[in-house]
Image (cartoon, rainbow, N blue to C red):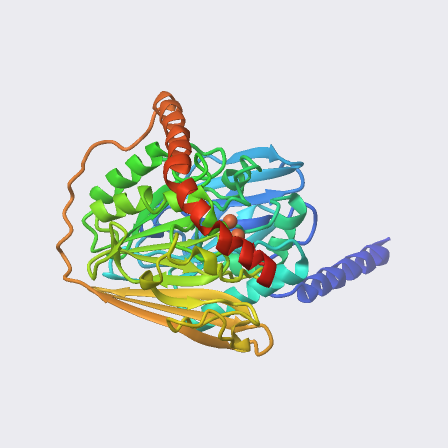
Amino acid sequence: MKNSGKIICLVLSVLLLVSLFSAPAGAETVTIGNAPARVSACIAGDNGQTVGFCWYTADKTDSVVTLTDEGGAPLDGAKLSEPVCEEWEGMWMHKVTASDLPAETLIAYTLGDGVNTVTGTVRTGGKADSVKFIEIADVQASSAENFEKGAATLRAAFETMPDAAFVANCGDFTNDSTNEEWDLYDGSFGEMNRTYLLAPVAGNHDGFGVADWFNNMFNLDTTESVQTKDGVNYSFDYGNAHFAVLNTNDCLNVSKPQLKWLKNDMNATDKDWKIVFIHKSPYTLGKDGKWPDALQLQQTLTKVCDETNVDLVIGGHDHQYLRTKPLTGNKLDPNGTTYLLSGTAGSKRYEVREFLAEHFMPKAFIDALVVQKGGYGNFWNGSDWRSTDERNVGGCYNTVEIDGGKLTLKSFILGDESQESMQIDALELTKNTGENKITYTGGNTTSKAAYAVGSVASYASLAVYAFTNWLPRFLVLVPELIYSVAVYDTF
Ligand SMILES: [Fe+2]
Ligand SMILES: [Fe+2]
């Protein structure tokens, strides 16, 4: 018995050693049903010093987050919220918010149920008068192949700007916002998503018509959001810039309560740079630019941007790249706001709708226009919509670097064939720092009653706008639209 005991001990010891040495060192994911999936770390407060973690599991499990610095030491003073674990579309959603994180620190996190875990990192800001970030939009894929193309675009963006503080995704993460598509998104983006802070923007494919998906995929600071059913509006500082994220699923574009929030929000900061992320873009030559919801933003959104000295608005929705010259009151103004339609990071790409030019989108406003589709116009030269450059067939990404009084935007296309990044546009803005003043110090929340009244007023305003402004202008361009359909099959 003594010998058999020794033999059993020896066999168990060997098995233990084999299992220890055969486990991949630093393995991040335990691939069983309750390994965390769809992990995101969102900016939920200034400088990423508050981070909203969200992940999914197949079954109901504990929601455990641990945080350390780069060297593995616990973070002094960091706080974790009470976890939320709720069923959503047949899976379990977990949310935990980490706050009071140290400034300018690379933070390592582990999350899961304590046994089945994944790890990731985020980098906080907070001291420097500078920030670098990447922006993409409209991956809007349904197939694994097209999600992979979108992920390749973001990987290329990180090769161009490896030290980006965060990624702004201006919406339409998926095409139909189904479990299958979010899992495909996670399959392509998941590993990368655990290396950065995300500032997500709700696209119409993420929210409108698929209510609650957006708010259940991302853990954001919704304290000041006017509503959270089909998207979220929120804001944060990073470096010497203030960022506001809008939700264009709100009453078909941006409701009156949300515009009021934006005005207060932008007047409540003295940061040097003011940037807005949005999904539907006011200035576009894409297929959605012909409808009143986008066109009304040329009146409503731009008015607030003018009043509050917003420097840059970055949006998506129409899958082409278009940057305006600075505008104020829908007129050229060197001190106005620049509007960037960011181009799609994915593979669904829209041709130019020439019939919109001059009617809805004055040519004189265009500073850069690149269509990512073969056989159509690109590198707008002021006269030829249909010059072509096959190198433009690829996914688009943008990098922005702010350093004191200088903002540098660079835009790129990752060629589908070449798999190389080609710079398609650059813009440099400069300003005197220290000139923005806080002019609003009140609260900025909206009651349910005020939102209900405001949303009725917003729909009424859109309807009036559609009949009195949009329709007369649309009827004028109908002959050109018919020509476009007949000759180019482009509606
Ligand atoms: Fe889109
Ligand atoms: Fe969209």
Q: Residue at x 33, y 28 (%)?
A: 446
Which image quarter holds the C terminus? bottom right
Q: Residue at x 40, y 42 (%)?
A: 472
Q: Residue at x 31, y 59 (%)?
A: 104
Q: In the image shown, does 68 or 199 lie closer to the viewer?
A: 199
> Residue 359: percent from the left, percent from the top?
39, 53
In the image, is residue 47 above or below residue 61? below
Q: In the image shown, does 139 or 57 lie closer to the viewer?
A: 139
Q: In the image shown, does 241 or 194 lie closer to the viewer?
A: 241
> Residue 488: percent from the left, percent from the top?
58, 63
Residue 316 appears anywhere in the view? yes
Q: Viewed as shown, does residue 490 lie left or right of 367?
A: right
> Residue 131: percent from the left, percent from the top?
30, 61
**Res. 340 image quadrant:** bottom left
> Residue 294: percent from the left, percent from the top?
42, 46
Q: In the image shown, does 92 or 35 lie closer to the viewer?
A: 92
**Res. 129 image quadrant:** bottom left
Residue 139 appears anywhere in the view? no
